Image (spheres, rainbow, N blue to C red):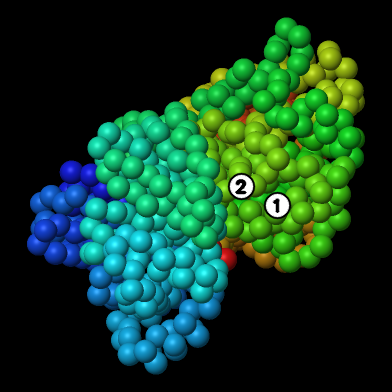
Amino acid sequence: MCGVIGYVGSNATPDFFFRGLERLEYRGYDSSGIAMINSDGVFIERAEGKLKNLKPKLAYLPEYAKIGMGHTRWATHGKPSEENAHPHRSENIILLHNGIIENYKPLKEFLISQGYQFQSETDTEVAAHLLNYEFKQNSHIKNPLERMKKSLYSLVSKIRGAFAFGILCTDVPDTLFAVKYGSPVLLGLGEGENYMASGLTALVDHTCNVIFMDDNEIAYVTANNIEIVDFSGNPAESHVVEVEWQGHMIDRGGFDHYMLKEIHDQPIAVAKTIENRCDIEKGQINLRKMTLFNTKLKEINRIQIIACGTSYYAGCLSRYFIEKFTGIPVDVELASESRYRTPTVNVHTLSIAVSQSGETIDTLQAIKFAKANKAQTVAMVNVPGTSIGHECDDECMLYAGPEVGVASTKAFSAQLSALILLGLTIAQEQEKLPKEKIAEYINELVKVPSFIEKVLTLSSKIKEIAKKYCDVNSILFIGRGYQWPIALEGALKLKELSYIHAEGYAAGELKHGPIALIDENMTVVCLAPKDQYYEKTISNIEEIRARGGKILSVGTEGDTELKNISNDFIGIPECSEIVLPFLTTVPMHLFAYWIAVHKGTDVDQPRNLAKSVTVE
């Protein structure tokens, strides 16, 4: 959730750190700060609110330095304020933090008894003071670096929770210290300079060579060297990964918002996710980079999809296809709930962790449980080198590219594509479908990008329709079958972006409660393409109409019956069953986007939300 950028070299400037923090804004934050050290001393500037509030304070930082770090904070302990913003200082220690220190209260009481005074309400300041305390306790060690190392080992042995620390020490002014346990830390390698960050987006302008730190590791980073050890001081194995992301991929590309760009990126996100994985001529899915492919998949008799938020809805939607392809029961679990019960999994269960960031803490903990109970585990993530990817037996990468807008769009379509491919793969390995049928599905799947392009041409029309609904207080979304998870996704997007109350329901559940809400003030978004559920959905719409509800329908273009009973109608191209959910999703994203634009809300960074939820 918090954003971290660190640098050691010869060219640390305030603008460098500020630009790095801008690249991390998507993670969500409510305050920010930068610390730099040069021969004149330690310089720290912090500000509450958006980065624009920090920018004027850059003038008080040194023009150049050899080391420094920046931070965007998401409040957990202590309200958003300048005092609670990071970095925090305790004499020779400057520290910033992503995560939660669970036992900070007894540690704080101890430190107060030792004479430490606290200037903030944060758990992070506890870590800064505790490290300073340990440094003093190790005064018998004369080498400052060795003294700092010993102090760090003591620090990590005394704190509990999930944490990533970036640390500077005035006694070791050429070294940036990074600590990882439960929150992501990346190290970037340069020439005569090195970097630390919480996310790839902060590094891609500077290097494509990255080390993804593992839990229980500490890194000592200088301009010309990176040493990584475990929490006991033993050397840790590390691997340099060359990432494909580039700086231009994180720009808005001429669009007003990242979200609008990412909605328009959906065709290429789907295309890249399925390309080189489908052999149309042979009618085969090729996921042979997965080690499960030739062995374990044949033994699977139950599938569990674990996810949160939009990823959960992608899982719910894919269940219809996977069960149809394989005949294997599929459970879709909210990770935040799954981990607090005891789901039945075993060696014949395939547990799929779906997470755009690959760092969602609830999903990570839930997949750890599944793995501990002998399930076969697969990570479906959009970012390389993630905690979830590292935890799982296998990884099925999405290739949507960087997603900066907090509200996920192109990752949803990529997730759905990858889950469908995985379902077809299982059907292929277990011989549940003939090659001809798999080839038929592949042929339809490769058409998805061009169909999405057609739906994107409706953006201007949806913009005009959205004007009519931007002042309503509540909207219901309904759909049947494949369209029900999309109704849930549409409702989530609307409430995230516009702050309008919205709920998604299975259309067949309307009479079981929600119909009581229908009157002339209620708007209902009805997903009613011409599919096997069409006639029943039309009956539901007639019930809404009879009670005076306003109807915005999404259906098959040319459907005059649906258009005539709707206040507004969005027509999508006629297509096959496997293509259809992709097409009804896009109007949901555009509708939420344009309502938010009309209302003037912060589209890319909605209030109270973070892109990557890495704390519990």
| Residue 43 rendering spot, x and y as whole percentages | 17, 64
**2 horizontally vs 552: left or right:** left
Which sits in the foreground, 141 or 485? 141
Which sits in the foreground, 139 or 546? 139
**344 horizontally vs 534: left or right:** right
Q: Earlier in the sequence, mark 2 or mark 1?
A: 1
| Residue 443 rendering spot, x and y as whole percentages | 70, 15
Residue drawn 25% across the image and 75% down it: 91
**375 horizontally vs 87: left or right:** right
Q: Residues within 10 Å of mark 2 (few under 14, many from 20)?
A: many
Q: Residues within 10 Å of mark 1 (few under 14, many from 20)?
A: many
Q: Looking at numbered disc 1 in the image, what kind of residue is underneath it?
A: Ile
Q: Is residue 46 above or below residue 116?
A: above
Marks 2 & 1, CB-CB < 8 Å contact: yes
Instruction: Work out whether residue 108 can be spotted.
Output: yes
Instruction: Work out whether residue 478 can be spotted.
Output: no
Residue drawn 30% across the image and 82% down it: 119
Which corner quadrant holds the C terminus?
Answer: bottom right
| Residue 361 rendering spot, x and y as whole percentages | 59, 57
Q: Quadrant of residue 532?
A: top right
Q: Secondary structure at mark 1?
A: helix
Q: Quadrant of residue 86?
A: bottom left
| Residue 138 rendering spot, x and y as whole percentages | 36, 74
Q: Residue furthest bottom?
A: 113
Residue drawn 51% across the image and 74% down it: 158
Q: Residue furthest top?
A: 281
Task: List the residue tagged with mark 2.
Answer: 388
Residue drawn 79% across the image and 39% down it: 320
* Gap in angstroms between the C-alphas marked 2 and 1: 8 Å
Task: List the residue tagged with mark 1.
Answer: 367
Name the disc covering residue 616, or none: none
Q: Is residue 337 above or below residue 381?
A: below
